[in-house]
Image: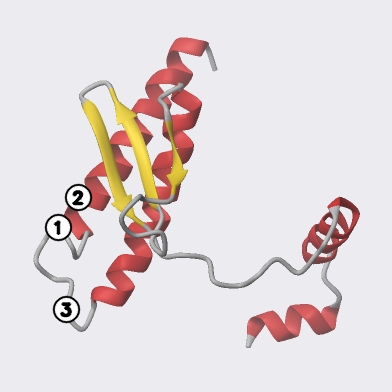
Amino acid sequence: MSDDHHTVFLLVRLRNSLRIIDRIDPSANGRADHEDAGEEYAVRNAEIWRALNYATRLGYPCGVAPTQNDTEWPVAYIDLPTGQISWHMPPYDTPWDQHDGDEKRRRIHAYLNPTSTQRAQEAT
């Protein structure tokens, strides 16, 4: 894929992600207290991570940072050519388990090459 085609591909993907976020975001659509809001936030948050991926690859400044007002809910930012956009994201509450780089790679390889017992556990 040529660089121009790749850029167009990423722009289309980013725009699609932003359309999905805009359409389903419970906080933007007055649905934050609706019974389906939890699932809608989960989909929205996954799509925000996807949008951050595309924005990064397009060279747009973006990332996740704590806010000055609410450090428990980090904020995902993307600086579009039209201006900055942001969303509060759920915090990651599990503390670091002291793993090092070697242990990280071992865990990744174990996940990528599961035993039959592990596959059965994942299926349930």
Mark 3 crowdedness (10 Å alpha carbons): few <14, some 14-19, many ≥20:
few
Asked where in the image residue 105 lies, by quadrant, the reply is bottom right
Marks 1/2 in contact by CB < 8 Å: the verdict is: yes
Local SS, label 2: helix
Amino acid residing under circle 3: Asp
The residue under the point 43% across, 51% down is 66
Q: Is residue 77 above or below residue 41?
A: above
Q: Which residue is mark 3?
A: 33
Q: Residue furthest front?
A: 68
**Foreground label between 1 and 2:** 1
**Residue for badge 2:** 22
Q: Amino acid at mark 1?
A: Ala
**Image coordinates for residue 59, horizontal then vertical, percent:** 46, 21
Query: Which residue lies under the disc numbered 1?
Result: 28
SS type, badge 1: loop
Left or right position of 27 against 44: left
Left or right, residue 117 beside residue 55 = right
Q: Amino acid at mark 2?
A: Asp
Which comes sooner in the sequence, label 1 or label 2?
Answer: 2
Which label number is shown at residue 49?
none
